[in-house]
């Protein structure tokens, strides 16, 4: 009996080590893509064929979301302090990546480029948020911001 208990405790202890919360994926259909030095994840929580939120894999914070899903996302992942609603165009492009299993590599790159441009259009709102969090311009300029260096990449792809 003691041997079974010891083995059971060992199995439970090892299982707890293998399933850390950082490795758990959020519910719903999900896809992650590399964008520059970031890994961006997109997810369709309610399986309606449209992306509901985006988050960066390293921070596990939602940074863009479908406006109508905001109340449901609180139980999925935390919102970034500067999270913003996703435009319809950004949602459409990201949904193409999520459900575009038949997209070739060149089509996938075109969609990723369109997503970067669409995100760039939202950049002023993100910048304003960062400024409101830290009104010292010197510290805001050095703060890491997703996709902030995409101008060079976009110029090369034209």
Image: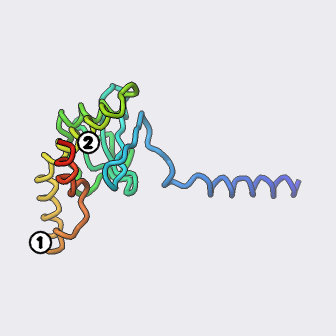
> Does dot 2 land on a helix, a strand or a loop?
strand
Check residue 76 in the rendering and tell me which mark sits there, or answer none.
none
Q: Residues within 10 Å of mark 1 (few under 14, many from 20)?
A: few
For the residue pair 41 and 147, the one nearer the viewer reads as 147
Residue receiving disc 2? 65
The residue lying at 34 percent from left, 56 percent from top is 37
> Does dot 1 land on a helix, a strand or a loop?
helix
| Circle nearer the viewer, 2 or 1 | 1
Q: Classify residue 49 as left or right of residue 86.
A: right
> In the rendered image, which quarter is residue 54 located in?
top left
> In the rendered image, which quarter is residue 80 located in?
bottom left
For the residue pair 126 and 96, the one nearer the viewer reads as 96
Q: CA distance from mark 2 to mark 1?
A: 27 Å
Q: Is residue 106 above or below residue 1?
A: above
> In the rendered image, which quarter is residue 17 located in?
bottom right
Q: Is residue 143 above or below residue 124?
A: below
The residue lying at 33 percent from left, 43 percent from top is 73
Q: Residue 61: where, in percent of width, then height?
A: 34, 53
The residue lying at 68 percent from left, 56 percent from top is 14
């Amino acid at each position: 009996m003691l041997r079974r208990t010891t083995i059971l405790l060992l199995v439970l202890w090892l299982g707890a080590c293998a399933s850390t919360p950082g490795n758990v994926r959020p519910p719903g259909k999900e896809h992650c893509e590399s964008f520059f030095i970031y890994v961006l994840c997109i997810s369709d929580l309610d399986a309606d064929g449209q992306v509901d939120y985006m988050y960066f894999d390293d921070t596990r914070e939602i940074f863009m979301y479908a406006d109508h899903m905001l109340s449901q996302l609180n139980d999925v992942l935390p919102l970034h302090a500067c999270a913003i609603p996703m435009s319809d165009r950004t949602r459409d492009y990201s949904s193409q990546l999520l459900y575009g299993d038949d997209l070739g590599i060149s089509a996938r790159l075109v969609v990723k480029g369109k997503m970067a441009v669409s995100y760039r259009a939202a950049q002023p709102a993100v910048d304003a948020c960062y400024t409101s969090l830290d009104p010292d311009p010197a510290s805001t300029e050095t703060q890491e911001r997703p996709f902030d260096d995409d101008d060079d990449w976009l110029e090369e792809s034209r």
